[in-house]
Image (cartoon, rainbow, N blue to C red):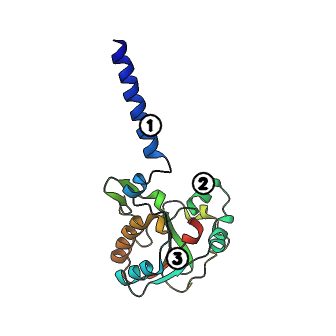
């Protein structure tokens, strides 16, 4: 009986060690399964994305300091966390932010991320994940054309698969809208 107890404890310890290794930062399996990248996007890959999606979209890189200015004005910890997400999307109409969402508000499943799970991107503006007044921007720190309907997306190669699934929706739901995409890898890598 004691041998059985001892062997079951050893099996349990081996399983626990395996689980801890799987969830440690030294093990990249979970990152790979979840589509998480650990390097900034290369210029060649960015050009490939530009060719893959609408050629009229503006693709830009944003430096860390400019990106950090965006969440300095947030007055709550929760809103600051929203603004630190690797993927953020704003819909701007007539110079005013009308909607906001981020990767943390999308639904994740075993098949990937679902941005439009509640048809929030089927309306114009899309259904904001949080009340816009909670964003507390005295001034949107990134220049944009205030005279038109525009989508502004901040994205990182960290979540490239999630970003591509968002672009697939935007390409269908907002085909005629001016899209500006800011890569913020400089902040994350």
Q: Position of residue 131 (x, y in %)?
A: 54, 61
Is residue 22 toward the left or the right of residue 145 in the image? Answer: left
Observer-side mark, 3 or 2, equals: 3
The residue furthest top is 1
Q: CA distance from mark 3 to mark 2?
A: 23 Å
Which comes sooner in the sequence, label 3 or label 1? 1
User: Is 178 in front, or is 12?
Assistant: 12
**Pointer 3 and pointer 2: residues touching (CB < 8 Å)?**
no
Residue that mark 3 sits on:
182
Residue that mark 2 sits on:
78
Judge the density around disc 3: few (<14), some (14-19), many (≥20) Cα neighbours within 10 Å: many
Observer-side mark, 1 or 2, equals: 1
Which mark, residue 26? none
Q: Position of residue 111 (x, y in %)?
A: 31, 56
Query: Could you tell me how many numbered marks the image carries?
Result: 3
**Pointer 1 and pointer 2: residues touching (CB < 8 Å)?**
no
Vertically, is 159 above or below 147? above
Which quadrant of the figure contains the C terminus? bottom right
Which comes sooner in the sequence, label 1 or label 2? 1
User: Is 182 in front, or is 25?
Assistant: 25
Q: Secondary structure at mark 2?
A: helix
Please report the residue visible at 64 percent of the width from the left and 75 percent of the height from the top.
141
Residue that mark 1 sits on:
17
């Amino acid at each position: 009986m004691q041998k059985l107890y001892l062997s079951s404890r050893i099996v349990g310890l081996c399983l626990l060690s395996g689980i801890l290794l799987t969830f440690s930062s030294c093990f990249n399996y979970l990152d790979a399964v979840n589509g998480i990248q650990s390097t900034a996007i290369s210029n060649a890959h960015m050009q490939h994305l530009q060719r893959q999606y609408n050629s009229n979209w503006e693709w830009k890189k944003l430096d860390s300091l400019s990106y950090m200015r965006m969440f300095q004005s947030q007055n709550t910890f929760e809103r600051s966390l929203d603004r630190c997400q690797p993927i953020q999307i704003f819909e701007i109409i007539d110079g005013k932010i009308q909607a906001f969402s981020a990767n943390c508000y999308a639904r994740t499943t075993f098949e990937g991320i679902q941005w439009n799970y509640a048809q929030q991107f089927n309306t114009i503006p899309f259904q904001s994940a949080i009340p816009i007044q909670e964003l507390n921007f005295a001034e949107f720190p990134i220049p944009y054309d205030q005279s038109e309907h525009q989508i502004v997306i901040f994205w990182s190669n960290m979540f490239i698969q999630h970003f591509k699934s968002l672009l697939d929706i935007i390409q269908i739901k907002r085909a005629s809208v001016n899209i500006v995409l800011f890569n913020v890898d400089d902040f994350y890598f």
